[in-house]
Image: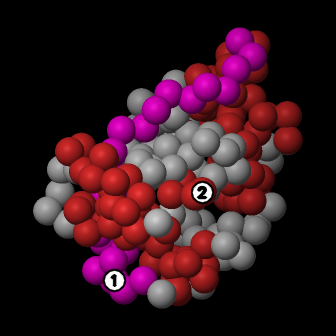
Amino acid sequence: MKLLAFAIVTAVLPMAAHADAMKGAQLSASCAHCHGIDGNSSAGQYPVLAGQTQEYLYRQLKDFKEGRRKDPMMSPMVGILSDEDMQNLADFYSSQNANRSSFKTDPALVTQGKTIVEEAKCTACHPPTFKGAKEVPRVSRQKYAYVVKQLRDYRDGVRTNDSGLMVPSVKGLSDEQIDALAHYLASL
């Protein structure tokens, strides 16, 4: 098993761009089951970590560790990490490339989602490319099911580790509008 983890880690190391990314790649072996060996998860309920901003990844790991964000699987996994481990993981995943989503979008919902994005002024915080910036997450190339869940969690007050920035934007959205937003973001 250790040999397999080493092979996986060394296979993705050439893409690593940060000094601590190598340590993060080694740590990521325990994350690969859900998030993929390079941060490109194959299951819709797990976020794509590849290409996410370093600052956002680190903050989310820290929030899981300190209880500001809760998940029955993530919270215990992150609980054992040191601050340096979290920085190294964030460096590793941010240096990877996010794969294009294989989710089949509905063109009508993509158009509706784009209209919602424009009306809600999502680009006031998220750059127009939705590729993230510092502590603002990359939401392009993210899993459809994950985006739907996160938007509903913000809207419904389940997820609150955003300093109150997302709630005003999503509190009045219906499930259908969230679906359209997720189709739009999956299309990018």
Q: Is residue 110 left or right of residue 152?
A: left
Does 63 sit above or below residue 126? below
Q: Does 92 lie within the magenta span? A: yes
Quarter of image, res 43: top right
Mark 2 or 1, closer to the camera:
2
Circle 1: element type? helix
- What span is in magenta? 81-107
Assess whether residue 90 is covered by the magenta stretch.
yes
Please give left or right for residue 16 compared with residue 155 in the image: left
Identify the residue shown where x is 36% and y is 38%. 97
Residue 107 spot, x, y in % from top left: 71, 12
How many residues crowd mark 2 within 10 Å: few (<14), some (14–19), many (20+)?
Answer: some
The numbered mark, 2 or 1, whose residue comes first in the sequence reads: 2
User: Which residue is labeled 2 in the image?
Assistant: 34
Whether label 2 touches label 1, CB < 8 Å: no
Which one is nearer the viewer's eye here, 155 or 34?
34
Kind of residue sitting beneath label 2? Cys
Q: Residue at x 76, y 39 (%)?
A: 178
Q: Residue furthest right?
A: 175
Q: Gap in Å between the C-alphas at discs 2 and 1? A: 22 Å
Q: Position of residue 60 (x, y in %)?
A: 49, 68
Kindly identify which numbered label has been placed on residue 83: 1
